[in-house]
Amino acid sequence: MHVEIRQLPAQRLATIEHRGPHNRIGEAFARLGQITGPAGLFGPQAAMIALYLDDPESTPANELRTEAALVVAPDKGLPATVGENLLPAGQYACTVHEGGYERLGDASARFMGQWLPQSAHLLADTPSFERYLNTPMDVPVDQLRTGLYIPLV
């Protein structure tokens, strides 16, 4: 697993909450796209990310809280039907998963469960997240690329 440590700026997010198994977040992303696309929020800074607010090892699957999010410019107005969150600036460990979304859970588990404990880094009290670098509309499933980010102290 190739991991880079990156200093990221704060990022303003338009969000739709998802509660339940992580692999069902696609429904929240669909709603987010239906709202933010017509609102003109897909600009140069736009990026789709998923914020993971609970630990899947200690939270029952039906209680997991996740946010489907779109990075938006600080000066953009948000529709009333989306939430707003701020991903804080800070140091993050990042690796890239290549392939289908169905294997993201395994990649995240290895990243958090193997790489992090073996590294000299500590987990910060900030959500981890995925950043979708392309989509199934753009490339075949085996060429999907997803950045996995862990916040560090």
Image (cartoon, grey):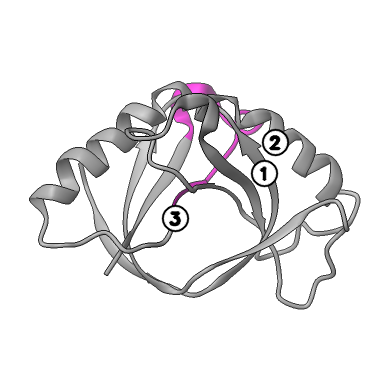
Q: CA distance from mark 2 to mark 3?
A: 18 Å
Span of residues in magenta: 128-144
Q: Residues within 10 Å of mark 3 (few under 14, many from 20)?
A: some
Q: Is residue 6 left or right of residue 137?
A: left
The kind of secondary structure element at disc 2 is: helix
Q: Is residue 133 left or right of residue 151?
A: right
The kind of secondary structure element at disc 1 is: strand
Q: Work out which quarter of the rendered image holds the N terminus and state it.
A: top left
Q: Locate residue 19, reporting x and y percent.
A: 61, 34
Q: Residues within 10 Å of mark 1 (few under 14, many from 20)?
A: some
The kind of secondary structure element at disc 3 is: loop
Instruction: Evaluate if marks 2 and 1 touch, with contact meaning CB atoms under 8 Å apart.
Output: yes
Q: Quadrant of residue 70?
A: bottom right
Q: Is residue 139 left or right of residue 73?
A: left
For image coordinates 63% across by 33% down, the residue present is 138
Q: Residues within 10 Å of mark 2 (few under 14, many from 20)?
A: many
Q: Quadrant of residue 79?
A: bottom right
Which numbered circle lies on residue 115?
A: none
Which numbered circle lies on residue 17?
A: 1
Give the labeled residue for mark 3: 127
Q: Locate residue 148, reporting x and y percent.
A: 39, 47
Residue at the bottom extreme of this rendering: 75
Give the labeled residue for mark 2: 28
